[in-house]
Image: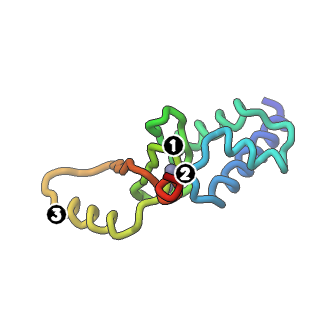
């Protein structure tokens, strides 16, 4: 890989990471593409997706496999719960108390060392509730 290519890749990656960390909407690769395009008009969807995959593997970001089949990405790597709307596919961060309760409960479990956990609630979001 030439130095030029390396620098371009680094620049792409840091731009994608910056955009992802600036929102709490858990965007898809397509949505991220729209976000980075204003600064990098020539970037392609496959480039965005490849960079997201690499960063997820490195633990820099979270990849969420949603029920709609479209992967969403999260710049917040601190463990937290998600609310997924089954109507519009939006993913929200769950309010903190839900997680604090769980953390306390898990701490009380004996003889099990937890490496990671995942919790997702599904339902209808406030926007969709208002529409129907
Ligand atoms: Zn919704
Ligand atoms: Zn999140």
Q: Which residue is pictured at 31% across the width and 68% down the height?
A: 100
Tell me if mark 1 has few (under 14), some (14-19) or many (20+) residues whose alpha carbon lies within 10 angstroms of its own.
Answer: many
Q: Is residue 99 visible?
A: yes
Asked if disc 2 is less than 8 Å from ligand 2, the answer is yes
Observer-side mark, 3 or 1, equals 1
| Residue at the limit of the structure toward the left, as seen here | 110
Q: Which mark is residue 108?
A: 3
**Dots 2 and 3: beta carbons under 8 Å?**
no
Q: Which numbered disc, 2 or 3, marks the residue that appears first in the sequence?
A: 2
Q: Which numbered disc, 3 or 1, marks the residue that appears first in the sequence?
A: 1
The picture places residue 124, in percent across and down from the top left corner, at 43, 51
Secondary element under disc 2, as helix, strand or loop, is strand
- Residue closer to the observer: 91 or 57: 91
Alpha-carbon span between mark 2 and mark 3: 28 Å
Give the side of residue 122 with respect to residue 56, left or right.
left
Q: Which mark is residue 84?
A: none
Q: Which residue is pictured at 70% across the width and 30% down the height?
A: 46
- Residue closer to the observer: 82 or 128: 128
**Residue at the disc numbered 2:** 74
Q: Locate residue 82: give its quadrant.
A: bottom left
């Amino acid at each position: 890989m030439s130095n030029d290519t390396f620098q371009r890749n680094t620049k792409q990656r840091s731009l994608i990471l910056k955009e992802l960390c600036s929102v709490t909407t858990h965007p898809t690769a397509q949505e991220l593409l729209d976000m980075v395009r204003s600064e990098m008009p020539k970037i392609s969807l496959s480039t965005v997706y490849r960079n997201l995959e690499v960063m997820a593997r490195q633990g820099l970001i979270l990849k969420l496999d949603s029920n709609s089949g479209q992967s969403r990405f999260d710049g917040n790597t601190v463990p937290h719960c998600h609310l997924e709307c089954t109507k519009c596919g939006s993913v929200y961060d769950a309010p903190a108390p839900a997680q604090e309760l769980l953390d306390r409960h898990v701490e009380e479990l004996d003889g099990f060392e937890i490496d990671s956990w995942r919790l997702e609630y599904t339902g209808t979001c406030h926007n969709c509730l208002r529409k129907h």
